[in-house]
């Protein structure tokens, strides 16, 4: 297939799609006779990204795949298109989400122990309804408490490809700075320094404990090797 035609197809399907599309999902849109290789699609996506590098929107890769989106710096103007105010979340919910993101997998009891207060069931219900967290297993202790971890939807919502792009791991007792760094009212595009990457490595170690292999696909874990990532 000519690259010019492939570029037009990619632009069309990404504009029409209601959610991010992975390379494998894009390949399934083609007949077997003209199905491009994954490498061809990735090369074409790079061309598309470069084509719109100066536009008001961009091609962004997040955890679930690729999507067109408005650039973050335009949010002050774009937000005025809607009269409805963005939903505000309580400090308790933001603290809980921060703990799950940085300490996953984590139990409800561990969250309560760190925060020093009981965790409202409505907070966990809201996080489940937003599809930002899910139960990924159970701790092998008396009572077998549920283990919570973030999802690909969490990464997609906050404009992240993997947990590697989270802000540097902070002292979880400093909730004001921690939830501020997460920029939960906006999507973050910050790049990590080497020291921040070392901090995120601690998240990797935490996130790999006590998880069954069958649970790994939907958990928002860092993508260490692009060839090993599932799409």
Image (cartoon, rainbow, N blue to C red):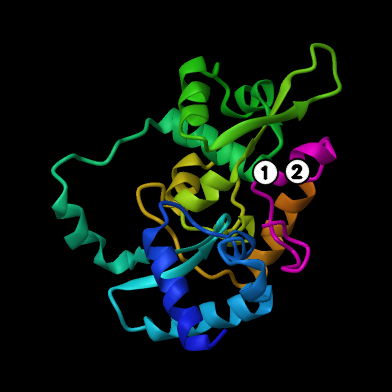
Q: Which residue is at the far front?
A: 33
8 within the magenta span: no
Q: Position of residue 108 (x, y in %)?
A: 64, 22
Tell me the quarter of the image containing the N terminus: bottom right
Q: Position of residue 123 (x, y in %)?
A: 47, 23
Is residue 68 in view from this perspective?
A: no
Label 1: state its secondary structure. loop
Asked if 149 appears above or below 30 in the picture, the reply is above
Residue drawn at (78%, 63%), measured in percent from left and top?
228
Q: Are marks 1 and 2 in contact (CB under 8 Å)?
A: yes
Locate residue 114: give its quadrant: top right
Label 2: state its secondary structure. helix
Residue drawn at (20%, 54%), measured in percent from left and top?
79
Q: What residue did someone put label 2 on?
A: 216
Q: CA distance from mark 1 to mark 2?
A: 5 Å
Left or right, residue 127 beside residue 32: left
Q: Position of residue 106 (x, y in %)?
A: 69, 32
Q: What residue did someone put label 1 on?
A: 219
In the image, 159 versus 18, the foreground residue is: 18
> Which residues, given as a range, are shown in magenta?
207-231
Q: Position of residue 93 (x, y in %)?
A: 46, 30
* Mark 2 residue crowding within 10 angstroms, few (<14) / some (14–19) / many (20+): few
């Amino acid at each position: 297939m000519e690259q010019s035609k492939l570029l037009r197809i990619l632009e069309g399907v990404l504009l029409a799609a209601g959610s991010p599309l992975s390379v494998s999902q894009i390949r399934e849109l083609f007949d077997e006779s003209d199905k491009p290789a994954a490498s061809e699609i990735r090369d074409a996506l790079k061309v598309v990204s470069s084509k719109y590098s100066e536009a008001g929107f961009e091609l962004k890769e997040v955890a679930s795949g690729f999507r067109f989106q408005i650039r973050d710096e335009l949010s002050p103007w774009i937000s005025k298109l809607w009269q409805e105010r963005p939903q505000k979340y309580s400090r308790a919910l933001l603290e809980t989400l921060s703990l799950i993101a940085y300490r996953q997998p984590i139990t409800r009891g561990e969250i309560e122990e760190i925060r020093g207060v009981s965790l409202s069931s409505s907070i966990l219900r809201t996080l489940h309804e937003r599809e930002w967290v899910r139960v990924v297993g159970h701790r092998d202790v008396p009572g077998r408490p549920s283990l919570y971890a973030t999802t690909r939807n969490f990464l997609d919502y906050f404009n992240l490809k993997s947990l590697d792009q989270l802000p540097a791991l902070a002292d979880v007792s400093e909730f004001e700075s921690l939830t501020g760094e997460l920029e939960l009212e906006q999507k973050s595009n910050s790049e990590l320094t080497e020291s921040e990457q070392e901090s995120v490595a601690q998240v990797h170690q935490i996130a790999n404990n006590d998880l069954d292999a069958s649970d790994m696909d939907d958990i928002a874990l860092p993508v260490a090797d692009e060839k090993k990532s599932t799409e």
